[in-house]
């Protein structure tokens, strides 16, 4: 349902966010579908509602630069100058993340996108929530980004509790995405803030990371996180022969495969795909830290968020298939 911009409605929106729900909100670029960026289960709901067949890193929306310092380890003066100059505004910076940012927000990547919208409704909403808001554009997978509350209502109206109305988005295209890595700036996506303005300010040409990020072909991100250890699907190997104390076992609800493993992780003991999604990247990282030599993964049910989980695991499995 669409709610007008009043103090009472902002408070109601913040309450929904605090209790793990989703709120669609206006920004100067496009409408976003927001969740508490520090709550992995709430973030998993975003993928569920958008009906995404895969995971994609999400931008954290903040209302002040202190919060940016809380979520990134970046201490570059150049980056802070950029923030000072262009934020709030239609630009996103991809910076090295701090531990506090859940893996599901970044799809397991070590960097996080941060953006400070200039839209007044967005800013009041984020401030009142008191937490960074993880949000992609508020459209169904494969559909156009919404620039009016009515567009959101049409696509997601029956799936979310609240759409905050901020009228029409005055920029109307998504934010420009700039990544800072190894002391250099790269453009990941052209958008609402002209790249030339950033180049003039920095006094340097920006390199476009080609194919790195193609908004029209989600899931094509080359830098999507893939574990550094081989993954195999249990139903594609002879499990009795493959079992090993050098292996990590990743199962959906319960372990039916015995305990001859270095480490066993259960994605969701209650069989909840949302919980499974919220745990996926975290567990893959944990396996790496436990130095398992390979991972045996059970397939999860093939519906809803299960499709995104299988997609992500399949990509990792295929990497190792091609080589062998
Ligand atoms: O204007 C915008 O940026 C809108 C409003 C709602 O803020 N948001 C938006 O989000 O366009 P989304 O999820 O539709 O697009 C964000 C893009 C995705 O293609 C994602 O892959 C990329 O940003 N992205 C986010 N975090 C990233 C990261 N750590 N590294 C590389 N790319 C990242
Ligand atoms: Mg989008």
Image: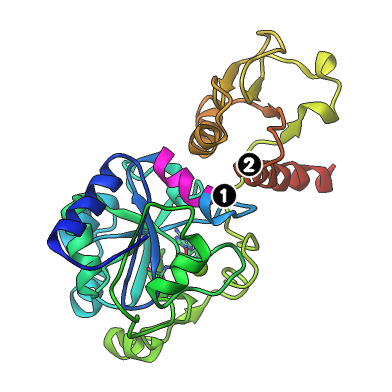
**179 part of magenta stretch:** no
Q: Position of residue 135 (x, y in %)?
A: 40, 59
Residue 235's quadrant in the figure? top right
The residue lying at 20 percent from left, 55 percent from top is: 67
Judging by the rendered image, the residue that carries numbered circle 1 is: 225
Local secondary structure at mark 2: helix
The residue lying at 33 percent from left, 78 percent from top is: 90
Q: Position of residue 238 (x, y in %)?
A: 86, 21
The majority secondary structure of the magenta stretch comes to: helix
Which region is colored magenta?
41-48
Tell me the mark number nearer the camera, choosing from 1 and 2: 2
Q: Is residue 215 left or right of residue 112?
A: right
Q: Is residue 106 left or right of residue 69?
A: right
Q: Is residue 220 left or right of residue 157?
A: right
Of residue 162 and residue 180, the one placed in the foreground of this image is 162
Residue 235 seen anywhere in this rendered image of the structure: yes
Mark 1, Cα crowd under 10 Å, few <14 / some 14-19 / many 20+, is many
Quadrant assignment for ligand 1: bottom left
Mark 2, Cα crowd under 10 Å, few <14 / some 14-19 / many 20+, is many
What colour scheme has been applied to the protein in the rendered image? Answer: rainbow
Q: Quadrant of the N terminus?
A: bottom left
């Amino acid at each position: 349902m669409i709610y007008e911009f009043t103090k009472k409605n902002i408070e109601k929106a913040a309450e929904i966010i605090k209790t793990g729900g989703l709120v669609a909100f206006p920004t100067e670029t496009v409408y976003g579908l927001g969740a508490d960026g520090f709550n992995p289960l709430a973030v998993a709901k975003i993928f569920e509602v958008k009906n995404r067949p895969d995971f994609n890193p999400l931008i954290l929306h903040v209302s002040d630069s202190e919060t940016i310092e809380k979520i990134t380890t970046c201490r570059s003066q150049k980056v802070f100058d950029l923030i000072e100059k262009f934020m709030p505004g239609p630009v996103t910076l991809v910076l090295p993340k701090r531990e506090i940012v859940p893996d599901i927000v970044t799809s397991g990547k070590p960097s996080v996108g941060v953006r400070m919208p200039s839209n007044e409704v967005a800013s009041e909403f984020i401030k009142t929530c008191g937490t960074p808001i993880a949000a992609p554009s508020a459209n169904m997978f494969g559909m156009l980004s919404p620039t009016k509350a009515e567009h959101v209502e049409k696509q997601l109206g029956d799936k979310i509790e609240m759409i905050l109305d901020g009228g029409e988005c005055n920029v109307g295209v998504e934010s420009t995405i700039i990544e800072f890595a190894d002391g250099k700036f790269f453009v990941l996506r052209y958008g609402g803030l002209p790249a030339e303005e950033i180049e003039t300010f920095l006094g340097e040409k920006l390199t476009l990371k080609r194919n790195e990020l193609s908004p029209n072909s989600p899931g094509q991100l080359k830098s999507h996180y893939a574990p550094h250890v081989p993954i195999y699907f249990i139903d594609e190997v002879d499990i009795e022969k493959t079992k090993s104390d050098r292996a990590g076992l990743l199962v959906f609800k319960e372990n039916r495969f015995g305990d001859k493993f270095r480490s066993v992780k259960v994605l969701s003991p209650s069989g909840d795909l949302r919980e499974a999604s919220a745990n996926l990247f975290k567990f893959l990282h944990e396996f790496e830290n436990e130095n398992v030599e390979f991972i045996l993964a059970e397939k999860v049910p093939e519906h809803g968020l299960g499709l995104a989980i299988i997609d992500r695991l399949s990509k990792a499995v295929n990497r190792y298939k091609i080589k062998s």
